[in-house]
């Protein structure tokens, strides 16, 4: 399932949760995008992947926290 929430025309949060039945993995992705100036953006992304066959709470397989910033320079 996917959910997108737009706070302003220049900022949104998007979340995605997926289940892969072939590898029994539950994956989640949450992303914040902010255009702080025209053509310049900040992205903050969190990824989480878990094994759904584990007992109790699913075991962590992979996790990432990523920050990306780009800046438009005009001459």
Image (cartoon, helix red, strand yellow):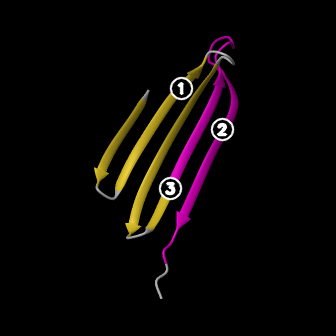
User: What mark, if any, has residue 28 been given in the picture?
Assistant: none
The stretch drawn in magenta includes residue 13: no
Residue 37 at x, y percent in the picture: 38, 71
Could you tell whether 29 is left or right of 22 in the image?
left
Q: What residue sits right under mark 2 in the picture?
A: 63
Secondary structure, mark 1, is strand
Q: Quadrant of residue 63?
A: top right
Residue 26 picture location, percent across and down:
59, 23
Is residue 50 within the magenta segment? Answer: yes
* Residue 38 x %, y %: 38, 70
User: How crowded is the residue under tag 1: few (<14 C-alpha within 10 Å), some, or many (20+)?
Assistant: few
Which type of secondary structure does the marked residue at label 2 adopt?
A: strand
For label 3, the SS is strand
Indicate which disc residue 18 carries.
1
Gap between marks 3 and 2 measured at Cα: 17 Å
Write the residue at 40% across / 63% down: 35
* Of pointers 3 and 2, the one earlier in the residue sequence: 3
Instruction: Determine which quarter of the picture holds residue 59.
Output: top right
Look at mark 3 in the image and give the residue it sits on: 43
The residue nearer to you, when weighing 12 against 60, is 12
> Gap in Å between the C-alphas at discs 1 and 3?
21 Å
Q: Which span of residues is magenta-colored?
A: 44-72
Neighbor class of circle 2 (other Cα within 10 Å; few <14, some 14-19, many 20+) is: few
Q: Main secondary structure of the magenta part?
A: strand
In this view, the mark in front (2 or 1): 1
Between discs 1 and 3, the one toward the N terminus: 1
In primary-sequence order, the first of circles 2 and 1 is 1
């Amino acid at each position: 399932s996917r959910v997108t929430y737009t706070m302003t025309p220049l900022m949104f949060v998007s979340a995605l949760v997926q289940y892969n039945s072939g590898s029994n993995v539950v994956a989640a992705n949450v992303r914040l995008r902010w255009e702080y100036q025209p053509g310049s953006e900040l992205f903050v992304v969190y990824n989480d992947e878990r094994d759904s066959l584990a007992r109790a709470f699913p075991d962590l397989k992979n996790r990432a926290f990523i920050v990306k910033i780009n800046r438009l320079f005009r001459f």
